[in-house]
Amino acid sequence: MKNETYQDRLLKTFRAANPCLMWAFFVVLAILPLVVKSEYYLSVMIICLIYATLAVSWNLMVGYAGILSFGHQAFYGLGAYFSAIMTMELHLSPWIGIPLGGCFAALLSFVIGFPCLRLRIAPYIAIATLAFSEILLVICKNWVSLTRGEMGLSGIPPLRDFSLFGLFPVVFSGGAKVPYYYVMLSIFFITLLFIYFQTSSRVGLAFKAMREEQDAAASLGVNITRYKLIAFLTGSFFAGVTGAFYAHYVSILAPDAVFGMGEMVEIVAITLIGGIGTFFGPILGAFVLVIGLEALRGLADYRLMIYGAVMVILIIVMPNGLLAGFNHLLEKARNFGMFRKARN
Amino acid sequence: MTSFPILFEQIVNGLVLGSMYALVASGLTLIWGTMKMLNFAHGELYMLGGFGLFFGVSYFHLAPWMAVPIVLLVIFILAALLEKGLISPMLGRPDWDVGAIVVTLGIGIFVQNFAFKFWGGDFQEVPYMISGTTSFLNITLAWHRIYILSLAVIVLVAFWQLMKRTRFGLALRATAQDIEAATLMGISYRRVYMATFGISASLAALAGTALAPIFSVNPWMGSGPLIKAFIVVILGGLGSFAGAILGGFIIGISESLSVLFLGSGWKDLICFALLIAVLMIRPSGLFGGKEW
Amino acid sequence: MLKINNLQVYYGDAHALWDINLQVRRGEICTLVGANGGGKTTLLKAVCGLLPIREGSVLFDDSDLLAFKAEERVSLGLSMCPEGRKIFPGMTVEENLAIGAYTKRAWKKRQSMMKQFYDLFPRLKERRKQPGGTLSGGERQMLAIARALMSEPKMLILDEPSLGLAPNTVESVMEAVQKINGNGVTILLVEQNVNVSLQISQRGYVIESGRIVMSDRSEMLLSNPHIKQAYLGL
């Protein structure tokens, strides 16, 4: 048994600690509002959770199933607008609007997915999904009677108050962030759970096979289109739900805020930072990027420039995201350390 | 119904627009044919062409016909360096097709927002290459539009001849078909890639300089052409030069005509509808799978 | 003319070629034979620069070949006709020949070179405007050899020219190879078809599982019992 260097042990500990750190993170998230009372910090956290859910659902499509979709923001926007319009015109409860928003997004993802997911080459899907998102932007801006065009919707009803166990009133209309935080946190956890179970199941195995080597998987009997559709529907559903939540959270909607390229870029950058195809990666990326940019307020103007640069640098230097990049760097450091020892 | 002059004008507009779509799409399909990747920064190269012309005219007080070649040269060099520095490293990797898309997307976004931050979001005016109008059969035609059409024809023919007859063109086609064999012939594929990117960028930038006087220069002027160019390339067939040209004109004319019936807000819908139709009926496009 | 010393080649982390020592003398036809997967193509790719070399040296006409990038080696006078011919399918016969003369020196002479090859291979002349992809196997081989010669090389490497060809065609290909050698081009012929290649060459090497196991004059190899049993089926 060779002598373990200090770096060896550090690497091992770090690796082993990864799942524990993740659980600790979730616990922290759960109890956060009990500790942090500032409305501002809570609102930042809610944004983090929104993007984390978007990134995780996008990661399912891209990282797990290998569908290079650049239209994720379309489903976000579809869920948002659907729920907003339904609650405003038909006076539905937002509690119903949110899951329905997800369903609507999933329905449309089926409509667009069915012709496009037959296509094997990554560029086709990238262009088709991007174009899909752009069409929706155009429709949203021009169908003024439905969406009020570029002026957007305002006065979207907040989530309806209810009583927890009939005893504790949960109030949304007051503008307090805590209830919204827990709702988004629940959405986040549900999304994670669903994705976890899906990727651990037979479906997840099919995803992996598809991602690695499509033709080989097809020859083994994996119905590629079917599984791609499953990933597509799942991802778009949760994006839609998140969008609907967003609509009722901020009460206003504009086409560019949800259907725009800015959202797409953010999702891509976040997932890249965290690590495509990993479970925790997109979550880490979301929190790092949103909090980071919030903290560096002065850089607000440069936000998209930074995202662009981040995408370029990361894909070249650390294509597997920060976590993997960090592990990789530690390994290199360890090898270097060992080499130096041997020379003595 | 619409009268003949209005119809004719829209057709001319369609031809003009279509020729520029063809130009931009040719660049895109050139990159695909040679390097098998999609350049998501293509729209920003178009935009840089427009801004280059603007700076050349406003800050350096050059006449447009002097500014344009300089802009093209600068962008050629810039694109070649970008390719060598940021894109080629991606192409050696296993998941290079995704990596190349992400890198160029990131570059595009960076450039677009750089322009917004440092050059302002205002719509800048740029002078026409040739101002004034002329009459033809009782119909007024702007000289600039005639310029654009002639430019497109000349450039596309020159490009075609470049590919068909010159030593460089042969080298590029060889690299596109078989890199190893091309290397055995003595061709440096790295240099071919750089030149490919440079030429492609120049084509997009040229279109940018041509359309800038009509649509004004702004940081986001490239996003529309990018998507349209993608759609043209898919319609025409990835890698097919003839397809890019034909597709460009089809989309240009359809768009222009649809303005008459749908109004300008909805005209973008036409090319998307065409895209969906192509993907459903014949994904390989009009000339897909063929070479030049 | 070509000296390979102690070459070690890896595919990633897998050791593919061990201690290769091989020499090709000026003006001769030298052959390298071995079964499928024995390492022939790997060695050729390494010599041409398409694969990296971990250790060892390659000297061509006394210059260190490894100091040159793959695309630069043609201008030194070394040309390869690769496995599977690899002609450019979308380019016409004429264009394939033209690109063979890509090097600056050869480019100027390409018209006269092409004329020579049209005389040598009349069938190519007939088909000169046809795309490479429409040619038959034998015609492709002719085209590939002609293309490799367009750069006026001092030495020509042929990687399995007989692959997939009917016996008659193989004969005509080998005749052409001998004619070319007669014109002063050194040949390194790599083949699975041991019989034919040993017959037209002066010296031969046998490679098995990444190592050179035998080297001798071709007529000695032809009568060698191991060769007879393993490769000639006798």
Image (tube, coloured by chain):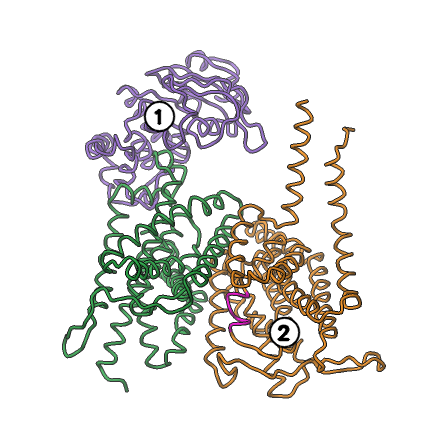
Name the residue beneath numbered marker 2. A246
* Secondary structure under the numbered disc 2 in the rendered image: helix
Residue located 39% across and 23% down the image: C189
- From which residue to which does the magenta span run? A256-263
Marks 2 and 1 close (CB-CB < 8 Å): no
Amino acid of disc 1: Leu
Q: Point out residue B281 in the picture as x, y percentages from the top left corner.
A: 43, 66
- For the colour purple, the matching chain is C
Residue A102 vertical placement versus A267 (above, below)? below
- In depth, the one of A13 and B251 nearer the eye is A13
Is residue A332 shown left or right of residue B246?
Answer: right
Is residue A99 shown left or right of residue C138?
Answer: right
Residue located 21% across and 31% down the image: C109
Q: Chain A is drawn in which colour?
A: orange
Residue located 45% across and 68% down the image: B276
Amino acid of disc 2: Tyr
Q: Point out residue C61 in the picture as x, y percentages from the top left corner.
A: 36, 18
- For the colour green, the matching chain is B
What's the chain of the residue with tag 2?
A
What's the chain of the residue with tag 1?
C
Question: Are both tags, 2 and 1, on one chain?
Answer: no
Is residue C150 shown left or right of residue B40?
Answer: left
User: Which circle, 2 or 1, is nearer the viewer?
Assistant: 2
Q: Is the magenta stretch mostly helix, strand or loop?
A: helix
Q: Point out residue A212 in the picture as x, y percentages from the top left corner.
A: 59, 49
Q: Does the magenta stretch include residue A4?
A: no
Name the residue beneath numbered marker 1. C78
Residue C36 vertical placement versus B87 (above, below)? above
